Image (cartoon, rainbow, N blue to C red):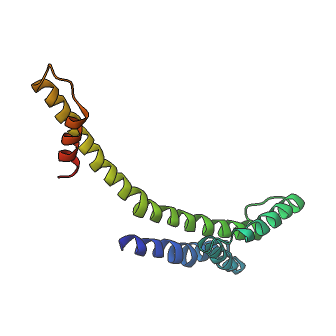
Amino acid sequence: MKFNWLAFFLLYILVPAILIPLYCIKSGNWYGLFGLIFYFAGLVISQFKQWIFLPIPILFCGWYWFTYGFTPTNFVSLFFLCLMAGVALSEASLWYQSFVHKILPEQLNNIEYDAKVAELERRLEEYRQKNPGQNITQDVVEKIRTEVFFK
């Protein structure tokens, strides 16, 4: 639950409501607030997986920069940066959520399994030391495995 508030704050409050207007105040040009629209467009593209629309601004910006030259203070560059920030932050949020809810629990299960395998190997080695002349049969291994994994 704590992450949901953090993601909400980062994606929907910090970047669009604080950083973009701060840039507009610093530059003294309020047309930069249109960057909010492009930021939320990037969020929508990423959240709803509408990747078909992403090449349109990329091609337009590439054409514009090729024709008029690239300047980081240009509105096209600012709007493209806002769009890509929306996409990148949304994808980072989705990746983090999948990591927390999918990969970490699998790793915890693997830790438990690795501990049980180590216990199985320890018991097999203990059996070898107690019975040095006997071969370890599949029945003995199955008995010890059942004790370790299913108790």
Q: Quadrant of residue 30?
A: bottom right
Which of these two is toward me, 97 or 10?
A: 97
Q: Residue at 72% of width from left, 67% of height from top? A: 80
Q: Position of residue 62 (x, y in %)?
A: 82, 60
Relative side of 18 to 111, left or right: right
Considering every residue shown, the one lying at the far right of the view is 67
Q: Quadrant of residue 134?
A: top left
Which of these two is toward me, 114 or 67?
A: 114
Q: Position of residue 68 (x, y in %)?
A: 87, 62
Q: Quadrant of residue 145?
A: top left
User: Can residue 74 be seen from the camera position used here?
Assistant: no
Instruction: State how many labels appear.
Output: 0
Identify the image quadrant of the N terminus: bottom left
Q: Position of residue 51 (x, y in %)?
A: 69, 68
Considering every residue shown, the one lying at the far top of the view is 133
Relative side of 7 to 37, left or right: left
Q: Residue at 57% of width from left, 76% of height from top? A: 16
Q: Position of residue 108 (x, y in %)?
A: 32, 54
Vertical comparison of 131 with 102: above or below:
above
User: Can residue 30 be seen from the camera position used here?
Assistant: yes
Q: Residue at 51% of width from left, 77% of height from top? A: 13
Vertical comparison of 147 with 3: above or below:
above
Relative side of 115 to 76, left or right: left
